[in-house]
Amino acid sequence: MPDPGPLFSPVSLGPVALRNRVFVPGHTTNFGLDNRPTARHTAYHLERARGGVGLIITEAVRVHPTSAGRHISLGSFDDSSIPAYAEVAEAVHAEGARIFAQIMHAGRQASGEATRTAAWSAADVPWAAGAHVPHAMGHGDIATVVGAFGAAARRMAQAGYDGVEVHLGHGHLLQQFLSPVTNTRTDGYGGDLDGRLRLTREVLASVTRQAPDLPVGLRISADEFLPGGLTPQDMLEVVGLLRDEFPLVYVHVSHSAYHGSYSLATQMADMSFGHAPFRHHAALFKRSFPGLAVLAVCRLDSLPEAVELVTSGEADLVGLARPHIADPHLVRKAMEGRSHESRSCLACNQGCIGRLESSLPISCVVNPEVGAEREWRRTWAEPPLAGTRPRRVLVVGGGPAGMEAALSARRAGHDVTLAEAGPELGGQVAIAARVPGRERLALLTAELSRDVAAERITILLGHRVEAADLLVGGRHEGVDDVIVATGSRPRRRELPGGPPVFDLWQAVASLEDPASPLRGTVAIRDDEGAWPAASIAEHLAGLGAKVHLLSPTASLAARITTYSRLALTHRFGELGVKVHPLRVPQGVEGGLLTLRDTLCGDVETMSGVTAIVDAGTPTAVDELYRELDALPEAPRVHVVGDANAPRTALEAVYEGRLAGTFLTDAVSGATALARAR
């Protein structure tokens, strides 16, 4: 890491002194109840404050019930919400950090089925095809929202917050009024920039009037990434005007609009975007407003990148949201010379935004303790082994589930051996990471391998375990617990007389072979609608193959979060990937691949197919578990990850953590954590 000194130097936002220049930007957690913070919020933010950040900005606090959405989001609609917010602020302050409240109205994407009321917006323009048409706000509605912003700011001041951040970005209500794409009004709140900016001016006036002692920052989208939308030059003008009129202490430079297109994908840029793809936005505003604090955000994955931005003068503070979900103690570890112990964000969007889309609380592939910080802290304060003898534990399988189980069992005080049949640790994630564009997955296996090596865990590579090995006289006689983490295997369905069929592992192994039939015309059977088929399709198309993605359902990549899918489909379009929904291969006739329409049964043909990739539903490798489960004289057996049921790394790591930690009291441990979910 470059010298972190500048990053860890103090800085002030107006009258608010911060201990360093790292902040946690606002991000939705779905930890709320009745639109108010809960004990889970308090524990979550406390852990990140304890981890050393200088500033925490809350997730969006909705200022009015028309922006409430589901009850698990946050809002501040009356004074009865103040005590709940005060608890969060007090916890953060107790750990030496400062906290700003982000206040917002979501506008046209706020409601729908959840509230049975119409969303409010500048005009009757829905955010995506098929979305609800919003209500074009009248002047009375506008006055209500303006007052609500001011009242929410006042409540945050009463709750002890150090400042507020007014959200003018991400395609929410204020941006809907500001953008010519969404504001088609002809009254005083539309038309030219002065009209479109009128609502934001009135909101800032209301905020500064009702909370006069509270510093105010502004979050913006520097670029909407929409034809005819707001550009960086537009936003430079907007910030200049607002800074002249209001005592803004910072500008928080993000980008995108909440729009059913590629623009939305940039807001939660996944690993396909590469490192720090939008840092130039913050740099532009810092050059233009050298006297105004500039906060940078989005796909800034690590502290070294944060150091670069601060030392180069591109930003005054750097926001790391997903990295702090992955490891809340990033800053403290770095300050103590323990950066090598950190867990890295994969930018996979799986446990964070992926769960939010299902109205679930956030989690994290690399950090199973997210959202249950209080319960896990109690667990590790008094390890589950307390009062009992260490158990001899054999973990079979060295993928993420197995490595996490071995680590957790060792940290709980047990004697652990980890056996892997292959030549190295990593499992299927190591295979997936070999696909270009998915390389960041290798961080998971590399850091788990690092941590396993650092503990007193016996590691056996090239070591296949049979059920007989665990019985009397076997080479693992005397083991108390067996954690089976043997993963899953891909399926491969042949098409007699047709082109060669590759399963997923075979396809990955052949990706870089220029003589492979995968370089011709390839049909990919995508039963899962997940990343394995999509990433292989994208890479093969990039190599020049003619790729046809076949799905038995009407959806494309349905198990990939919308934020990532919108970027994926954009790339598919650029690469010429052909998508065939409601189609499955039926056979080969006269050299032609026949496809059956799963809806009506019609048959069509595809010519020139040189290879088929079968991305069908995988099968659990659970033979060892089945054998041991049927033997009364066998050790206790636990099954985790894909060996339990083929799913994703999110579930694998979580189950490994649970199994290893609660070997001596699995039922009560799992029950306590289930209550936290």
Image: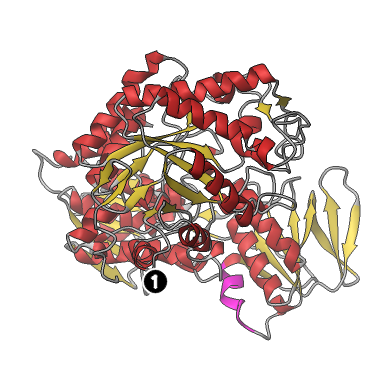
**Residue 78 to residue 68: above or below:** above
Residue that appears at 62% across and 33% down: 198
Q: Nearer the viewer, residue 645 or 335?
A: 335
Quarter of the figure with the N terminus: bottom left
Closer to us: 36 or 208: 208
From the top left corner, tell me how far across and down residue 422 is, in percent. Answer: 39, 71
Residue 573: name its quadrant: bottom right
Quadrant placement of the C terminus: top left
Residue 606 position within the rendered picture, expressed as x and y whole percent measured from the top left: 87, 65
- Horizontal placement of 302 versus 270: left or right? left
Percent from the top left, x then y, of residue 130?
76, 36
Instruction: Read off the residue under disc 1.
Output: 422
Residue 311 lies in the magenta-colored region: no
Residue sitting at x 44%, y 25%: 209
| Number of marks in the rendered image | 1
Classify residue 444 as left or right of residue 146.
Answer: left
